[in-house]
Image (cartoon, grey):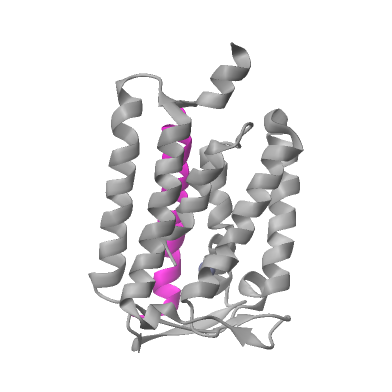
Amino acid sequence: MFVGHYGPAFAVKAAKRPPSLGAAFLAVQLVDVAWAIFVMTGIEYGRIEPGFMALSALRLDYMPWTHSLPGALAWSLAGMIVYRVFDPRGGWGAAMLIGLCVFSHWVLDFLVHAPDLPLTFNGMKVGLGWWDIPALGVGAEAIVLFVGFFLYLGATKPIAIAGRIAPWALITLFCGLYAFDKLGPAPANLKAAAPMALGAYLVIVALGFLLDRTRVSKSALQAKA
Ligand SMILES: [Zn+2]
């Protein structure tokens, strides 16, 4: 899954003491950020195989450190602790939401991936394979993204005019990136695709921090009043 991962990051902004949106954007893709780095360095590997699944050409042979269940749990715990240390404003509540964001990645990948997600370090691989059923693959991604997005819009208020435009600009960008990912040319190999994915994830994190400055959480406003 790609843009659907951002649904939970938007959704946690509806919490009473929400974490930073930029940090939440990093959290939901933390497992893939690590994966891209590990693919570039050869620690994890896979292949591009056009036609592998209707919506994905990624044959992910070996990714125990990032996409195994114990791996994802470890990243979630680490994400929670690191967030608590570096941004203590929201306390353990916001840090726990960051941890949940990290773990949501594995759950959403489980829906769409072929059985390539190990339940142990590298054994008992699972995945429901919705990427092979386009209606389910596209539908799940769109529903998760837009439910989170509308929760976010409902729970926050624009500070100025930028706060009205920015969320829609970002969601349009997400739709464009998704279309390019699914309809654009397949990258030559996984080692070439990984830095592109990493770059996109990091730009989106920066946009999350920017968007966060244009809107304020309604619950934060109530707490002040
Ligand atoms: Zn993933």
- Is 61 positioned to the left or the right of 87 in the image? left
- Is 23 positioned to the left or the right of 59 in the image? right
Residue 160 location (% of width, % of height):
35, 19
- Is 160 positioned to the left or the right of 16 in the image? left
Residue 222 location (% of width, % of height):
57, 18
Residue 37 visible at all: no
When the figure is inspected, residue 165 is found, relative to residue 44, above or below; the finding is above
Quadrant housing the N terminus: bottom left
Dividing the picture into quadrants, the one containing residue 158 is top left
Q: Is residue 56 magenta?
A: no
Residue at image location 66% in from the left, 78% down from the top: 64
Front in this rendered view, residue 86 or 166? 166
- Is 57 positioned to the left or the right of 70 in the image? left
Main SS, magenta region, reads helix
Residue at image location 54% in from the left, 64% down from the top: 32
Residue at image location 52% in from the left, 51% down from the top: 8
Quadrant housing the C terminus: top right
Residue 156 visible at all: yes
Residue at image location 51% in from the left, 25% down from the top: 218
When the figure is inspected, residue 87 is found, relative to residue 179, above or below; the finding is above
When the figure is inspected, residue 113 is found, relative to residue 31, above or below; the finding is below
Residue 82 location (% of width, % of height):
72, 45
Q: Is residue 212 magenta?
A: yes
Residue 98 location (% of width, % of height):
64, 47
Task: Magenta stretch: give its range.
Answer: 188-213
